[in-house]
Amino acid sequence: MRTLCASTLIGEFFVIGFAGLVAMKDPDLSMGTVWTVSGIAMLLCVLLCGVITRPGGVQLGWALQIALILSGFVVPMMFIMGAVFAGLWWASVHFGRQVDEAKARFAAMAESQAEAGGNTA
């Protein structure tokens, strides 16, 4: 799960940075505000890569997805990009857990076969 989720978060890192560039063109927003908000969101993406498997990591990721969708009120294209990344986040969590379960089953099966092979030799 960690690899899939981290890949999604790194993709979001870049999308948030590009959205910051677009938001910077809005005359109603100061450059400092845009880059403070974008920078915090980008930093959160990177930090979440390291804590995704810890308790609350997936929930923080969902909070980031919601914030990304809501950023569409500033940069309208982010409604679409946020929805796309929310779908990718769901897929990363869902299929990542399935991969982790399959790896655990395979490791348990390999261990039991090694024990059975070790007892007959």
Image (cartoon, grey):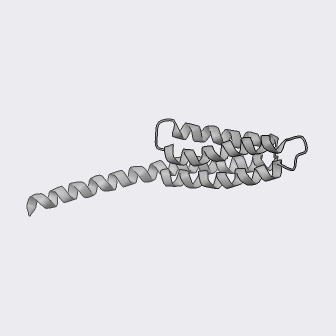
Residue 52 seen in render: no
Q: Relative to residue 24, is residue 67 depicted above or below?
A: above
Extreme-bottom residue of the structure:
121
Residue 7 is left or right of residue 75, and the answer is: left
Residue 84, x across and y down, in percent: 68, 51
- Between residues 22 and 84, which one lies in front from this camera angle? 22
Residue 16 seen in render: yes
Residue 97, x across and y down, in percent: 46, 48
Extreme-left residue of the structure:
121
- Between residues 112 and 1, which one lies in front from this camera angle? 1
Q: Relative to residue 39, is residue 121 depicted above or below?
A: below
Quarter location, residue 61 = top right
Q: Relative to residue 23, is residue 66 depicted above or below?
A: above
Residue 98, x across and y down, in percent: 45, 50
Q: Relative to residue 2, is residue 56 depicted above or below?
A: above
- Name the residue located 67 percent from the left edge and 42 percent from the top edge: 40
Residue 29 is left or right of residue 78, and the answer is: right
Residue 28, x across and y down, in percent: 89, 40
The C terminus appears in which quarter of the rendering?
bottom left
